[in-house]
Image (cartoon, helix red, strand yellow):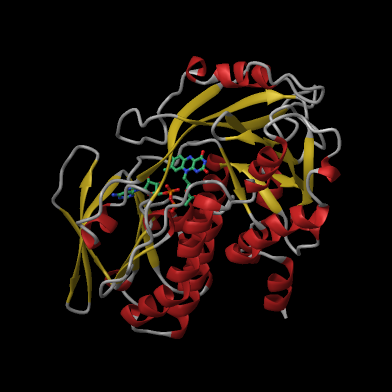
Amino acid sequence: MRNMNEDILIVGGGIAGLTLGLCLHARGISCRIFEKTSEIKLLGVGINVLPHATRVLHDLGLGPALDAAAIRTSEASFFNRFGQLIYTDPLGTNAGYATPQYSIHRGDLQHVLANAFVARAGCEKLITGISCLEARDVRDGVSLQFEDNAGQSALLVSGRAVVACDGIHSNLRKQLHPQEGPPRYSGFNMWRGVTRWLPILSGATMIRAGWLETGKMVIYPIRDNIDVEGRQLVNWVAELARPLVKEPRDWNKPGEVEDFIAAFEDWRFDWLDVPGLIRGAEIVLDFPMVDQDPLPFWTQGRITLMGDAAHPMVPRGSNGAGQAILDAECLAQLLTEEDDAGAAFETYERQRLEATSKIVLINRVAPPDTLIKEVIERTGDRPFDNIDDVISKAEMAAFQQRYKEVAGYDLATLKMKAK
Ligand SMILES: Cc1cc2nc3c(=O)[nH]c(=O)nc-3n(C[C@H](O)[C@H](O)[C@H](O)COP(=O)(O)OP(=O)(O)OC[C@H]3O[C@@H](n4cnc5c(N)ncnc54)[C@H](O)[C@@H]3O)c2cc1C
């Protein structure tokens, strides 16, 4: 039995940190999670978790809790800005995967993970309200310096090794890569909101419509049956070209509908009143679409990076949370096979850095919705009479297949892995 000083220390109690805590606990490896916020609140809006990552969560026994909190997304439907259907791609179990794709409120996902971690590992293992400033690789372990919410920075914690799961503004990433600038702006801003709305299309459809230059919408439900009329909580993201306004980039910054509604004012389709959905929002957040160039390394001695701290990506392929979950499972497994944490970190980096770098890069140029751009170019951004005259079904399927292969969740690969 290891003592407290030999815990794996996890900085950040977001999706990566909590999943890593659960994966380590399931393998009998002691850990502690240190989270900056003083409590795990319902922060953020919608998030998607693809089948390769939900398999990890199901293996952790979280399937029933996720089914109660989330929507099992059944298909992705692509539209032009005139509301015409281009293509529908089945998703999750509807496409033959063993586990579903979930659309879920980020806060609900974080709560499912945090509740399970506290119930299994004990509440003393999740320490909130302290922020990690620095990590030192010392003899036989690591030493972390924290400040609390009152700004007291004398807190020192030692452990076996540290995994930085502290998100896109990671302090420990800055420590390992001091020359790196702030997250790289894509030129497109996202206004993200949630609206109480009756089910749209199948009630489990992920909708992508339009393109970035003239305005793009991503819409999907994240909670079912929230009132007696059977409304859902519907997540939407409006994406539009805009010069970068100002820093800092804060996930919780409120947004103004008037800053972007003009681009969607005439989006009144027979299947959805888009301006009505936007205006009915109970919360609107404003966040620039950012990522970072892939790093040359994540690991220094007994310090390594995970999730958004390691590979922040533009959210255009539903892969941010999922890749964080896959990182967590990979590292937890390696730590069971290798007692030397530094050596396990090196192997983890070899297995995950290149794979996630490819996703960061493909998300910039060819995420799944590039299909819509292709149709816009072929039609001169005008309505079409018949989509089959514009692009064949096989070509459209190939767009989706390419992305799934790079992101590691094409059906054939997952079936092979399951054998
Ligand atoms: C408040 C918030 C809202 C978000 N909303 C959305 C959303 O609506 N849609 C979406 O697609 N993605 C959202 N994200 C990002 C999304 O969660 C990640 O892209 C993805 O899930 C990968 O998770 P992660 O654990 O690597 O990072 P995150 O989920 O960002 O988690 C990082 C965690 O580290 C904590 N932390 C940061 N610095 C320190 C420190 N110095 N010491 C200790 N703890 C620290 C943060 O408080 C946070 O809990 C949000 C992130 C945050 C923090």
- In the shown orientation, is residue 419 left or right of residue 335? right
At 82% from the left edge and 37% from the top edge, which residue is drawn? 202
Q: Nearer the viewer, residue 173 or 152?
A: 173
Question: Which residue is found at the position 53% from the left and 70% from the top?
Answer: 26
Residue 107 in the image, given as x and y percentages of width and height: 53, 40
Q: Residue at x 38, y 57 (%)?
A: 165
Residue 85 in the image: above or below residue 7: above
Residue 274 visible to an observer of this rendering: yes
> Whole-percent x and y of residue 373?
64, 42
For the point 53% across and 57% down, the residue is 362
Q: Does residue 72 appear left or right of residue 409 in this picture?
A: right
Residue 311 location in percent, x, y?
42, 58
Whole-percent x, y for residue 60 in the image: 61, 64
Determine which quarter of the picture holds residue 135: bottom left
Vertical placement of 30 versus 166: above or below?
below
Compared with 107, 266 (above or below) is: above
Compared with 232, 177 (above or below) is below
Q: What is the quadrant of the C terminus in the image?
A: bottom right
Q: Quadrant of residue 84?
A: top right
Locate residue 266: give its quadrant.
top right
